[in-house]
Image (spheres, grey):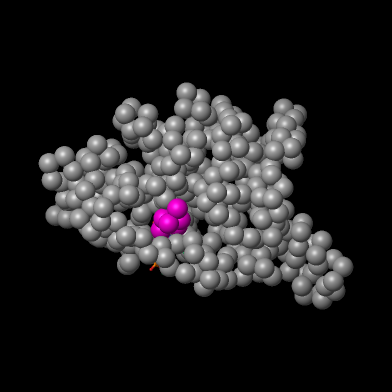
Amino acid sequence: MDLNYSPDEAAFREEVRGWLSANLPQDLKQKVASYAHLSKDDLLRWHRILAKQGWVAPAWPKEWGGTGWNVVQRYIFDEELGYAGAPPLIPFGLTMCAAVLLRFGTEAQKKRFLPRIYHGDDFWCQGYSEPGSGSDLASLKTKAIKDKDSYVVNGQKIWTTLAHYADWIFCLVRTDPGAGRRQEGISFLLIDMKTPGITVRPLMLMDGAHEVNEVFFDDVAVPAENLVHEEGKGWTVAKYLLGYERMNTGRIGESRRQLAALKEFASARIQDTRFRDRLSRLEIELMALEITNLRFLDRMRRTGQPPGADVSMLKIKGTEIQQGITERRKYLSMRKTTIYAGSNEIQRNIIAKMTLGL
Ligand SMILES: Cc1cc2nc3c(=O)[nH]c(=O)nc-3n(C[C@H](O)[C@H](O)[C@H](O)COP(=O)(O)OP(=O)(O)OC[C@H]3O[C@@H](n4cnc5c(N)ncnc54)[C@H](O)[C@@H]3O)c2cc1C
C-alpha cells in the first residue's frame, strides 16, 4: 500500500493551489470564510470561472468537457477547493444528473443537457424525497401516468434543496402503481420547473435559512422524451446516482481549513483543557479520515474499481467531524449533514450489510 503522493501528484497540487490563489475572487472567499449566505449569482459566478478554465467537471469524459485527471488528481482538486475556501459546486447538475445522463441518457438528452449544465445555464435540483419516503425511498408515491406523448405528474416532493433557484428538477416518479415489488414501476423523469402546475414552497431550516423546499406537482405535463432509461427502471438509475451523491460528503479540505481557523481563534483565548482536548480529538479524527481516504484512493488507483460501500464510512466520519468543528458558528445549520444524502444511521446499515455481511 502506498499512502504517499507521487512527485507528479505533488506538482499537480501546487498547480491547482497556485491557480486558486490567483483566480478565486476575494469577496467569495470572504463570504465562505464567514459562513455568509451565498446567492445564486455567487454560486454561478464561481461555477463559470471554473468552466472557463475547463475545470468545472473533472470527472466527465473528455469529449463532454472532462479534464482527463485520474482519481487521485480529482481528489486533490476537491481537497484544494475546500482548503482554499471556494464556494461549493452545486452537485445536482454537475455530479448527479450528469452522471445519470452519461450512463443512461440518449445521445439527444446528452447533447441537450450536458453543455448547459457545464456552462451553468441550467440550475438543477433533486426530487427524490417525499413526506414519509426519505430513508424508505422506494415507498414514494408521486404518480406519472402516460398520456400519448406526455407523462402527467401529480404528487409532492420535500426537502428539495435550492428548488427556488432551479430551472430543472430530476424526479423519481411511480409510473406503474400495480408493479409487483415497490422498486419496480418507478421511473426517472427530467422536469422543466417552468411547466404549469408546479408550485415551490419554502421550508425554513431551524437556523432561519431558506435552502430547502416543498415542490408540488398538479397535473404537470412532461414530454415523454424526458424519461431517462426505460420506463419502470428508475430504481436502477436512483441507486447509481446515490453512489455519486455520497462521494463528496467527506469534505476533508474544507474541514482542514475550518479546523485551522478554529485553532487560530482558540489558541489565544481558550485555555480550558476540556475544550483543548476536544479540539485535539477532532484533529486526530480528521487525520484518521484523511488516511482512510488515502487507503481508498490507493486501492482505486491500483484496481480501477469504484469505492462502493466504503463511501459510507467517509460520509459518517466526515459529517461528524464537520459538525464538531463548526459547533461554535453553525451548530443549528450543520445538524443536516448527518441526515441528507442518506442519514448516517442508513450509512451504518449499508456498512453492516455490504462490508461486514451482517
Ligand atoms: C437539509 C436537507 C437537504 C435535503 N435535500 C434533499 C434534496 O435536495 N432532494 C431530496 O430528494 N431529498 C433531500 N433531503 C432529504 C433527505 O434525503 C432525507 O431527509 C433523508 O433521506 C432522511 O429521510 P426522512 O427525512 O424522511 O427521515 P426518515 O427516513 O423518516 O428517518 C427518521 C430517522 O429514522 C432513522 N431511520 C430511518 N430508517 C432507519 C433504518 N432502517 N435503520 C436505522 N435508522 C433508520 C433515520 O436515520 C432518521 O434518524 C434533504 C434533507 C435535508 C435535511
Res 96 visible = no
Which residue is farthest top?
63
Front-most of residues 169 and 183: 169
Residue at point 73%, 69% (across, down):
278
Residue bounds of the magenta highlight: 158-165
Residue at point 55%, 54% (across, down):
39
Residue at point 60%, 43% (across, down):
46
Q: Where is residue 42 in the image (x, y as percent from the top left)?
A: 58, 49
Against 35, is 50 above or below? above
Res 208 visible = yes
Q: Is residue 230 left or right of residue 324?
A: left
User: Which image quarter holds the C terminus?
Assistant: bottom left
Against 6, is 122 above or below? below
Q: Where is residue 70 in the image (x, y as percent from the top left)?
A: 59, 30
User: What secondary structure do most residues of the magenta stretch adopt?
Assistant: loop
Residue at point 36%, 54% (across, down):
127
Q: In this view, does 352 lie to the left or right of 171?
A: right
Number of marks in the rendered image: 0
Q: Position of residue 317 (x, y in %)?
A: 59, 58
User: Which image quarter holds the N terminus?
Assistant: top right
Q: Is residue 249 left or right of residue 86?
A: left
Which residue is farthest right?
268
- Ligand 1 location (quadrant): bottom left
Q: Position of residue 33 (x, y in %)?
A: 70, 56
Front-most of residues 47 and 88: 47
Residue 294: image quadrant is: top right
Please tell me whether residue 26 belongs to the stretch shown in magenta. Answer: no
Against 36, is 307 above or below? above
